[in-house]
Amino acid sequence: MHELKAMMAGSVWEVCVEVGDKVEEGQDVVILESMKMEIPLASEVTGTVKEVRVSKDDFVNEDDVLIVID
């Protein structure tokens, strides 16, 4: 089980996956917005999305878990 964590505080601009989606290593799964910059976060593993813990416009802090991939 792999947890994708926020690398910085910011707002969720877009969630690119849903529970059950298959993802590849390097695929963008969440896009954060901070200081008017869009920062894509890519999956570090290949697998299936088990949990999506954020929604568009949520505010996240550094190290918050955003997506769980199995």
Image (tube, grey):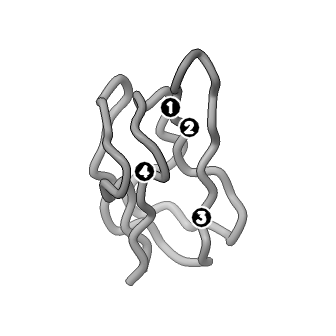
Q: Locate residue 41 relative to residue 24 in the image: left or right.
A: left
Marks 3 and 2 sit apart, C-alpha to C-alpha, by 12 Å
Name the residue nearer the viewer: 43 or 60: 60
Marks 2 and 4 sit apart, C-alpha to C-alpha, by 14 Å
Residue ID at (61%, 77%): 46
Amino acid tagged 1: Glu
Amino acid tagged 4: Glu
Task: Tell me whether the residue at label 3 lies in contact with that at label 2, contact meaning CB atoms closer than 8 angstroms.
Answer: no
Instruction: Specify few, some or many for label 1: CA neighbours under 10 Å numbering under 14, 14-19, or 20 or more.
Output: some
Q: How many marks?
A: 4
Residue on which disc 3 sits: 43
Which badge, 2 or 1, is on the more N-terminal residue? 1
Task: Tell me whether the residue at label 2 lies in contact with that at label 1, contact meaning CB atoms closer than 8 angstroms.
Answer: yes
Residue on which disc 1 sits: 14
Marks 2 and 1 sit apart, C-alpha to C-alpha, by 5 Å
Residue on which disc 4 sits: 18
**Location of the C terminus (image quadrant):** bottom left
Which badge, 2 or 4, is on the more N-terminal residue? 4
Marks 4 and 3 sit apart, C-alpha to C-alpha, by 13 Å
Amino acid tagged 3: Ser
Marks 1 and 4 sit apart, C-alpha to C-alpha, by 11 Å
Residue ID at (35%, 57%): 63
Task: Report which quarter residue 43 is drawn in.
Answer: bottom right
Residue on which disc 2 sits: 31
Q: Give how far across and how far down residue 66 sits, in percent.
A: 36, 53
Marks 1 and 3 sit apart, C-alpha to C-alpha, by 14 Å
Which badge, 3 or 2, is on the more N-terminal residue? 2
Task: Report which quarter residue 27 is drawn in.
Answer: bottom right
